[in-house]
Image (spheres, grey):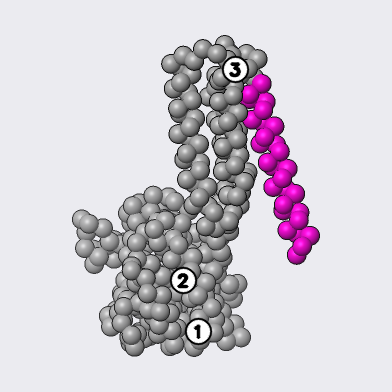
Amino acid sequence: MTSLSGFRRRQESIRLLLCAAFALLCAAAVTGWPAQVSVSVFALPLFVASYLLGPRRLPWYVVGLLGVELVVIASLGDVDARMGVSTAVLFALALMVLLTSFRRSQLGVTGLRGESMLVDLRDRILSQGMLPALPSEWYAETALRSAGGTPFAGDFVVASRPGNGRRLELVVVDVSGKGEDAGTRSLLLSGAFSGLLNALPPGEFLPAANDYLIRQNWDEGFATAIHLSLDLVSGDFALRAAGHPPAVQRCAGSGRWTVHPSEGGTVLGVLEDADFPAVTGRLRKGDALLLYTDGLVENRNRDIAMGIDRLQGQGERLLRNGIDDGARRLIDKLGSRNDDRALLLVHRR
């Protein structure tokens, strides 16, 4: 542990020396060729240092850089309006860098390391929703889209295959809010819900998830969810919903779509001791089941019932051409681009 911390300190010292050398190089360029090189060139080492240096060293570097700039300006003699404006802009940029550094000091990470941490957390959300390997007669696929195309979303999927591989447990969750605002809550809930899904019987998952969310005491802390527990041998399934849009099933034999009612389950994080009744059914050969979030079927100009009808119509047209990649093709055709969307497709070949 000591050697690792020492290695990191040496790395930070090397980065500080490189940034200092860059600043001195800029100073030499401005002093040597004042007609060709403006003092605004000092913005380059300022920008580089904001990414490379930690919150403890960055403020001292910024102060030193501004001092070097003032020395260079004093050595040039006459200060015209152009140089004065460039200097004022650089000081404003330095102030913004310092404010950002103070915020980073709460985490104790540099810019690049902090961004990599967020990327890693986002990838962990996606990994929670990775579907386990299934028997050859089963096909499952997830598709997620975030509001505005941002990397973080409030919709996510968690999956598990307990019971010696006989059962498939899938949960689609819609956290209150959207995009980056809901992304931080999704980071926490995806890990917690994944652990609960693997540890508890199907009937106990949503009550435990509800208790967990209530204990967080978030100002905007509710979520909707739908939980599918599927027997991979018989095709029997149980659906439990918490304020979530109903699942829809395509029956291959009749070619009809069935909407499985989901009334009775309140949203997660609102009421203690909430009840989440199960709706049962069976997936026969050729059948498909769709689980989704409200961003796929609801918008300001359309009732959710009409959105579900449109989902069935689009699903019939698209899935007629093959199930493979069906979730991606369907989610790209439906829903608002200004809302998070998630779609889960399960098919028995």
Decide: few, some or many residues near mark 3? Use Cα within 10 Å; few <14, some 14-19, many ≥20: few
Decide: few, some or many residues near mark 2? Use Cα within 10 Å; few <14, some 14-19, many ≥20: many
For image coordinates 79% across by 60% down, the residue present is 3
The mark closer to the camera, 3 or 2, is 3
Q: Is residue 305 above or below residue 73?
A: below
Q: Please name the residue that numbered disc 1 is placed on.
A: 231
Residue 26 on the magenta span = yes
Magenta stretch in the rendered image: 1-28
Residue 176 on the magenta span = no
Indicate the quadrant where residue 68 lies.
top right
Q: Is residue 17 above or below residue 247?
A: above
Q: Secondary structure at mark 2?
A: helix
The mark closer to the camera, 2 or 1, is 2
Distance Cα–Cα, label 1 vs label 3: 80 Å
Q: Residue 200: give x, y in percent of width and height.
A: 51, 86
Q: Please name the residue that numbered disc 2 is placed on.
A: 189
Distance Cα–Cα, label 2 vs label 1: 25 Å
Which disc is residue 60 wearing? none
For image coordinates 72% across by 53% down, the residue present is 8
Q: Please name the residue that numbered disc 3 is placed on.
A: 75
Q: Secondary structure at mark 3?
A: helix
Magenta span dominant secondary structure: helix
Q: Is residue 42 above or below residue 142?
A: above
Which is nearer the eye, 84 or 11? 84
Indicate the quadrant where residue 288 lies.
bottom left
Indicate the quadrant where residue 205 lies.
bottom left
